[in-house]
Image: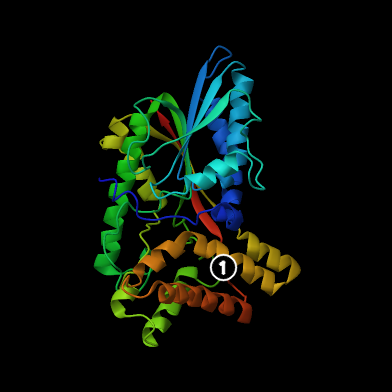
Amino acid sequence: MTSKQADNVTMSGGGVYSLATRGAKDVIDAATPRVLEAVNQLGLSPASERFTMADMGCADGGTSLDMVRGVLGRVRELSPAVQSTVIYADQPGNDYNALVGILHGRTRFHSWLGEIEQAWPVFSGSSFYLQCVPDGMLDLAFSATAMHWLSTLPCNITGHVHMVGATDGEAETFANQGRRDWESILMLRARELRPGGRMVLVNFCRDESGRYLGNTGGVNMFDTFNRIWQSFLADGRIREDEYHRMTLPQYYRTMEEFSEPLVDPDSACHRAGLRLDSIETRVVPCPYAEQFRRDGDVGTFADGLIPTVRSWNQSIFAAGLDPARPAEERAGLIEEFYGAYHRLVLDDPRGHGMDYVHAHMTISRV
């Protein structure tokens, strides 16, 4: 895989991502007890001198601050003289300037830096689709809401914008790419983890009931995206080739797809020493929909939901528009798209929201 392939999406920069994605932090908070239990299993002792963890797919780092603080605190309880390193990794287009600002307390976020003794952040200039650190360096690897992004877009989807709406051969093409990427990600982590190390991964999934992000019984979020772009196509605001390029390079794996390379003794991942300790699915409610159910304020609901939606997909949709269009025209179309979504929620908020459906897994390296 080339570094260009491993840099296919960018979260909103300038600290906007963490400000707009309360739900992503809720997911990490819900996974923190699992992470702390993984720390307890590392075999650290009062004599341990070094601890190294990685947050892969960190974005601007704001959503994981409390989790990292908890890990570093637990490590110091186990090993009072330990020196800890936190490695932040994402994709090359990530806004690391925003990450530095958040870590140094230049925003409203409460950083762990300077609060935990003998703990330092460093930044990997690689990508989590590539090896990020030398062999055997990591005690603990963590990733949340990141590895559903594919290393490359395997094909455009003919009549939808996401693999959950793909059919026949296109669905199979996405599944094959998802399998290759998952096995590649695991093999890289097998090299980076020391024997006895642990990895906690929290990934978007399709759960046992067929639920997935934005599809937990109400209005299907991805179908909504698709209907709006199809209306733009029908009105002549975008062309057919542009509509096809709106395909999001994501794949939501099932429990079986996550587990297979970790439990099959003949798989390369199993032979590399990776073992699936536990896996479960969890649904974290959309915080904006939850607030709306409490206060009935539809304006606040729409004003919170739409920014969190656009924080992770705007770069893809904007790139789908013909670059020959004037920049102002492209920007206007993007604003019209999210404006149309905003109006849908205002007109009838029932069923809208973005509940988070994740697989939570702990993986060990023997």
Q: In this rendered view, identify the residue nearer to me: 22 or 83.
A: 83
| Quarter-of-image position of residue 188 | top left
Name which residue lies at 32% across and 73% down. 322
Locate residue 219, reporting x and y percent: 53, 73
Badge 1 marks a residue whose secondary structure is helix
- Residues 257 and 67: in front is 67
Q: Is residue 22 left or right of residue 87?
A: right
Q: Quadrant of the C terminus?
A: top left
Residue farthest right in this picture: 295
**Residue topped by disc 1:** 306
Pick out the residue farthest to the bottom: 235
Classify 128 as above or below 241.
Answer: above
Image location (x, y in percent) of residue 22: 61, 55
> Who's the residue at 38% across and 42% down the image?
128
Instruction: Tell me, yes or no, if residue 97 can be seen here.
Output: yes
Residue drawn at point x = 53 percent, y = 25 percent:
84
Three-letter amino acid code at disc 1? Ile
Tell me where residue 256 appears, x and y as whole percent: 37, 49
> Does residue 287 appear to the left or right of 270 in the view shown?
right
Residue 118: percent from left, percent from top? 59, 22
Q: Is residue 334 above or below residue 255?
A: below
Up/down of 350 relative to 144, above or below: below
